[in-house]
């Protein structure tokens, strides 16, 4: 029949046209999709690597004698059998990571759309992934974590490939045995051993939830280092398990009632604060490791054990005085770190109070004032008046509230007299005191107000031990270091610390060095540091106590070995009248009693062991054990008899300072200086 409209092909209906163009577009879409798949599939990784375990290189830390301190990096254990795991273990991961795991073909389109919509509406915030367990497995096995569309498309292709070659049970088993759980643990078995010290087959419901929580971010939700954040995420996991029917609300509540305890095995290892401190240094020295490394350190494990025990026991003994934390660091005369304790319990807090915390130095700062004065021409036996003084409107007071009148500089330092330190700093200038402290190793900001003379400066123990070390080693600056050598497991040396004794920088000259050592000996022999005395050893040091008793210090040394101790509270609340001559001096002494026999100790290179006290009646009383209140200890304890010390060796070879002019004695007011009562004020 002829077309009534006059020739041409008959017109299709709207439905027919829609079907036609849908088929055409579908065919072209399939062709385009096939082309894209071919393009992105060209450089897909070799799937034969499926059973290869890729891990980060490990770093083994050795002490100075070759004993293992710690191994940081990847830990891989044999794969766990899914059938041997409690049913709630895999259920926890499915509930929080991929609720549709048993129903999709490798990817979840709706989940991906929701994630993209969220990311577009929350630019600049934390991105949502939307990846299924199969996609995560594909990424972990074959790809990188690069945020690119190419990687995402390849991830989809590989996810579909996994789904077509393995059962859901096999995919879930591969996932659990390959995923990163943080802390260097790869796979559920390694994670269970690392965090709970048990096989994965014995995991409790709460422990399973805690491990599943790490999937959101193995570092941020690490149960050992971020326990609070991990616990909150584990609660989300348990609630998700209830929503998916994996457990009942009663089982969830029972899990809440049974606290999960992360294994203390890692915390019980010695020197973990030290290893943490070195970890970033190793990477800065040799770059990110691409193979297993061995780091030979300066730490001495027996001395480290003594330091950790001394800090724990010392803080525990004074917990009734509101002492909450402590830190200790010890170095030898060349700066090698021999002991490093950043806190009382690494398992509870990984915050390093040796190098990361800065607290007021208190009277432990005064040696910098006195050294500046000695370099300006003052002498230990010089007479000075302990009397009230006002400097630019600031009036320091002594701890005892009393003033002793005319005394020697040596006695003033031994008894930590505040007015004398303030008077000296004002005379030589706080700017010069600042320069002295910086020359010895203080790198923290130093203010130059008059109160700086009494230690109104925030410093770290690692800075203070470096600064005091110059008094112990003959006057040389020796920056602390912990890495001696870095090599590969095969023995190839990547880094070697170079120390040249001839190239050391002299920072204290003559006669200031022996004068300071002489005075600092008297702090222990007859002053505020009496509790640090150890018979038979040549020791010197200085106590420090800050305002409101927030910080207390003792920093002491023998020939070629220096240790700094700090105690206080992390929240900076006051302790109950804890002074540097109390808990810190006791911790220092207990540590040194254990450490000294292991060290090749020598007398302090400089200064007289016993002072000439003929012209100082107060010094006579102190050295003969007469009752004199401890200027820094609230107990006013009688100083014990001074310990016998080995004779000092000849002065070390170094440039001799020219004879310096001696300034006139500070003027003594007419008549005997009165004893003035004043409100009690701790040494700053």
Image: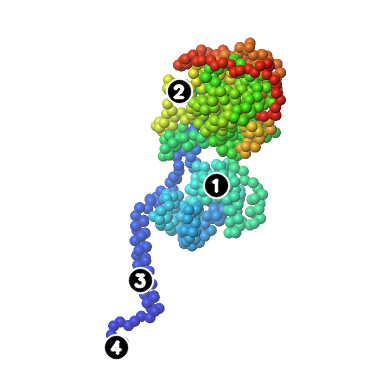
How far is mark 4 from mark 1, CA to CA? 79 Å
Name the one closer to the observer, 448 or 169: 448
- Residue 267 vs 499, above or below: the answer is below
SS type, badge 4? loop
- The label shown at residue 314 is none
In the rendered image, residue 632, in percent from the top left (x then y), is placed at: 66, 25
Sooner in the amino-acid sequence: mark 3 or mark 1: 3
- Label 4 or label 1, whichever comes before in sequence order: 4
Q: How many marks?
A: 4
Residue 669, can we see it?
A: yes
> Is disc 4 surrounded by few (<14), some (14 to 19) or many (20+) residues within 10 Å?
few
Density class for disc 1 (Cα within 10 Å; few <14, some 14-19, many ≥20) is many
Distance from disc 2 to disc 1, alpha carbons, whole Å, reads: 46 Å
User: Which residue is identified by label 4?
Assistant: 2
> Disc 4 to disc 3, how far (Cα)?
29 Å
Question: Where residue 136 sits in the image (x, y, percent)?
Answer: 47, 53
Identify the residue position indicated by label 1 in the image: 221
Left or right? Give the position of 66 relative to 618: left
Instruction: Assess whether mark 4 and mark 2 are in contact (beta carbons under 8 angstroms).
Output: no
Choose the circle earlier in sequence order: 4 or 3: 4
Locate the N terminus and report the quarter of the image it occupies: bottom left
């Amino acid at each position: 029949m002829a077309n009534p409209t006059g020739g041409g092909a008959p017109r299709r209906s709207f439905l027919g046209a829609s079907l036609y163009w849908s088929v055409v577009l579908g065919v072209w879409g399939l062709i385009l999709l096939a082309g894209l798949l071919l393009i992105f599939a060209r450089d897909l990784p070799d799937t034969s690597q499926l059973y290869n375990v890729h891990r980060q290189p490990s770093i083994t830390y050795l002490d100075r004698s070759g004993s293992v301190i710690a191994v940081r990096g990847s830990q891989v254990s044999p794969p766990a059998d899914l059938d041997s795991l409690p049913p709630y273990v895999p259920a926890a991961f499915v509930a929080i990571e991929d609720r549709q795991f048993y129903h999709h073909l490798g990817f979840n389109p709706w989940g991906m759309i929701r994630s993209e919509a969220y990311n577009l509406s929350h630019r600049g915030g934390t991105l949502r992934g939307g990846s299924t367990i199969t996609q995560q497995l594909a990424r972990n096995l074959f790809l990188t974590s690069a945020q690119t569309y190419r990687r995402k498309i390849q991830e989809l292709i590989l996810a579909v490939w996994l789904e077509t070659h393995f059962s859901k049970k096999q995919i879930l088993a591969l996932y659990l045995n390959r995923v990163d759980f943080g802390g260097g643990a790869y796979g559920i078995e390694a994670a269970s051993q690392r965090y709970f010290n048990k096989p994965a087959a014995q995991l409790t419901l709460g422990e399973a939830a805690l491990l599943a929580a790490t999937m959101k971010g193995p570092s941020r939700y690490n149960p050992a280092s971020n326990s609070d954040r991990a616990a909150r995420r584990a609660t989300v996991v348990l609630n998700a398990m209830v929503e998916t029917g994996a457990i009942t609300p009663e089982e969830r509540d029972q899990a809440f009632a049974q606290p999960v305890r992360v294994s203390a095995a890692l915390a019980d290892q010695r020197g973990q604060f030290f290893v943490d401190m070195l970890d970033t240094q190793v990477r800065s020295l040799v770059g990110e490791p691409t193979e297993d490394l061995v780091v030979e350190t300066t730490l001495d494990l027996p001395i480290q054990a003594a330091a950790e025990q001394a800090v724990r026991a010392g803080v525990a003994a004074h917990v009734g005085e509101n002492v909450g934390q402590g830190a200790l660091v010890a170095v030898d005369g060349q700066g090698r770190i021999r002991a490093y304790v950043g806190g009382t319990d690494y398992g509870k807090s990984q915050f390093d109070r040796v190098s990361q915390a800065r607290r007021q130095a208190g009277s432990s700062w005064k040696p910098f004032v006195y050294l500046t004065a000695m370099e300006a021409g003052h002498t230990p036996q010089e007479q000075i008046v302990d009397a009230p003084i006002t400097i630019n409107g600031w009036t320091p007071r002594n701890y005892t509230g009393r003033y002793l009148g005319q005394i020697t500089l040596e006695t003033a330092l031994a008894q930590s007299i505040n007015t004398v330190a303030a008077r000296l700093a004002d005379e030589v200038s706080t700017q010069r005191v600042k320069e002295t402290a910086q020359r010895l190793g203080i790198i923290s900001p130093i203010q130059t107000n008059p109160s700086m003379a009494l230690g109104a400066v925030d410093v770290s123990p690692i800075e203070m031990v470096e600064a005091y070390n110059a008094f112990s080693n003959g006057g040389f600056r020796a920056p602390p270091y912990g890495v001696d050598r870095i090599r590969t497991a095969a023995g190839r040396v990547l880094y070697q610390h170079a120390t040249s004794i001839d190239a050391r920088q002299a920072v204290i000259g003559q006669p200031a060095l022996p004068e300071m050592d002489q005075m600092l000996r008297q702090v222990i022999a007859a002053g505020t540091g009496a509790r640090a005395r150890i018979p038979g050893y040549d020791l010197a040091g200085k106590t420090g106590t800050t305002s409101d008793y927030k910080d207390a210090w003792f920093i002491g040394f023998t020939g070629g070995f220096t240790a700094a101790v700090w105690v206080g509270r992390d929240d900076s609340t006051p302790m109950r009248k804890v002074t540097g001559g109390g808990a810190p001096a006791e911790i220092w002494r207990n540590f040194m009693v254990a450490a000294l026999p292991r060290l090749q100790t020598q007398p302090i290179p400089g200064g007289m062991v016993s002072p000439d006290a003929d012209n100082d009646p107060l010094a006579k009383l102190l050295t003969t054990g007469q009752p004199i209140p401890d200027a820094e200890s609230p107990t006013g304890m009688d100083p014990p008899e001074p310990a016998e010390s080995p004779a000092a060796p000849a002065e070390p070879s170094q440039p001799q300072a020219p004879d310096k002019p001696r300034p006139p004695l500070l003027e003594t007011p007419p008549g005997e200086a009165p004893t003035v009562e004043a409100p009690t004020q701790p040494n700053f």
